[in-house]
Image (cartoon, rainbow, N blue to C red):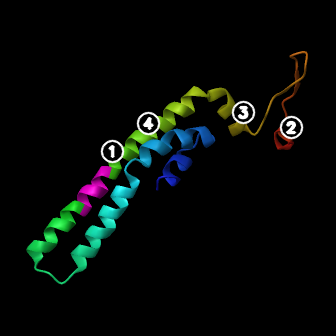
Amino acid sequence: MSYLVPSVIGGGPAAVRAAGPWVDKWAVCRLVTINGGLALTLLPTPPAVRALPAGVVVAAYGLALPLLGLGIRASLRARRERPDRLAAHRCGTRRIVGRSGRLVSSSPAAARSP
C-alpha cells in the first residue's frame, strides 16, 4: 500500500518519492505490532486476554490511515509543483527545443524517441 496508493494517484516518480516518507513512517513498528498482535489473538486464551492484542492491532491499522492521508497530501503537493511536465506527459507529447530556443518538434513520435 505504501507504494501502490501514491503511484495510482499519479504524478510520476517525484510524487511517489514525496509520499514515501509519510507512508513509511513507523512502518517496522506497525508491521511488528500488527503481526505480533494477530499471533497473540490466535492463541488459545480467554476472550478477555485476546481483547487487548486485538485492540492494539486495530490501533496500528488506524494509525496507517492518517499517515496515508499525509502521504497523499504530499504527493498531490509535489504533483502541483510540476504541472508543465505532467501535462506534456499526459498528452503523450514532448517539446524538443533546439539551441536557438525555437520549438523543433511537438509530436507524439518525439515523445517515444530516447
User: 86 or 47, which lies in front?
Assistant: 47
Mostly what secondary structure, the magenta segment? Answer: helix
Please tell me whether mark 2 or mark 1 is closer to you in this view: 1
- The reply to whether dot 2 and dot 1 touch (C-beta < 8 Å) is no
Q: Residues within 10 Å of mark 2 (few under 14, many from 20)?
A: some
**Residue pointed to by mark 2:** 110
**Residue pointed to by mark 1:** 66
Residue type at the position of mark 1 = Pro
Residue 88 is marked as 3
Q: Quadrant of residue 52?
A: bottom left
Q: CA distance from mark 1 to mark 3?
A: 32 Å
Image location of residue 53, percent across then percent down: 20, 67
**Is 58 part of what is drawn in magenta?**
yes
Residue type at the position of mark 2 = Ala
Image location of residue 40, percent across then percent down: 23, 74
Q: Residue furthest bottom?
A: 44
